[in-house]
Image (cartoon, rainbow, N blue to C red):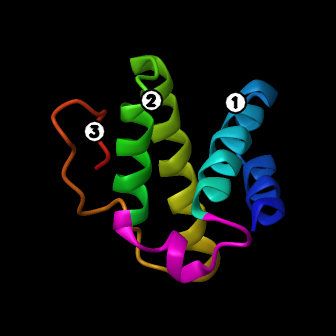
């Protein structure tokens, strides 16, 4: 899945640094989900909210939360376009301390 996401990012007009950061953030998310996460796992809105809460519990910098959120938005757009999955971030409401996930 990560390889396909990398190919998707290569088609977008992003800087090499942005592509690298998106891949890194999404790889960390997929790793957090477990070994070889399924499409069902990555299509579940609670996977994203739980992960962002996990990051908040680690007291990461607000800039990292914001960047991770942007990476996950790009990843869910990829899932929607590539696998015709509904976007799991579309109807989520943000937590008071996290960046907007809508």
SS state under label 1: helix
Direction from residue 50 to residue 30 in the image, left or right: right
Where does label 2 land, which residue? Answer: 58
Question: Which segment is the magenta one?
Answer: 34-46
Residue name at image x 52 percent, y 75 percent: 41
Where does label 3 land, which residue? Answer: 100
Residue name at image x 77 percent, y 34 percent: 20
Residue name at image x 32 percent, y 46 percent: 101
In magenta segment, residue 40? yes
- Neighbourhood count class around disc 3 (C-alpha, 10 Å): few under 14, some 14–19, many 20 upward: some
- Of 55 and 69, which appears nearest the observer? 55
SS state under label 2: loop
- Of 14 and 62, which appears nearest the observer? 62
Q: State the CA–CA distance, disc 2 to disc 1.
A: 23 Å
- Neighbourhood count class around disc 1 (C-alpha, 10 Å): few under 14, some 14–19, many 20 upward: some
Q: State the CA–CA distance, disc 2 to disc 3.
A: 18 Å
In magenta segment, residue 52? no
Quarter of the image that includes the N terminus? bottom right
Q: Position of residue 29 (x, y in %)?
A: 59, 51
**Mark before the other along the chain sequence, 1 or 3:** 1
Q: Residue furthest front?
A: 57
**Disc assigned to residue 18:** 1
Q: Position of residue 26 (x, y in %)?
A: 64, 49
Q: Nearer the viewer, mark 1 or mark 3?
A: 3
Q: Position of residue 60 (x, y in %)?
A: 46, 22
Residue name at image x 31 percent, y 62 percent: 90
- Of 61 and 84, which appears nearest the observer? 61
Q: Nearer the viewer, mark 2 or mark 1?
A: 2
């Amino acid at each position: 899945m990560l390889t396909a996401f990398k190919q998707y990012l290569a088609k977008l007009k992003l800087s090499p640094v942005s592509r690298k950061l998106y891949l890194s953030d999404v790889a960390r998310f997929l790793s957090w989900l477990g070994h070889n996460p399924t499409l069902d796992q990555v299509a579940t809105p609670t996977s994203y909210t739980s992960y962002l809460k996990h990051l908040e519990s680690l007291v990461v910098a607000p800039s990292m939360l914001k960047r991770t959120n942007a990476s996950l938005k790009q990843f869910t757009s990829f899932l929607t376009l590539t696998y015709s999955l509904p976007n799991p971030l579309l109807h989520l409401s943000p937590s008071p301390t996290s960046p907007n996930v809508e």
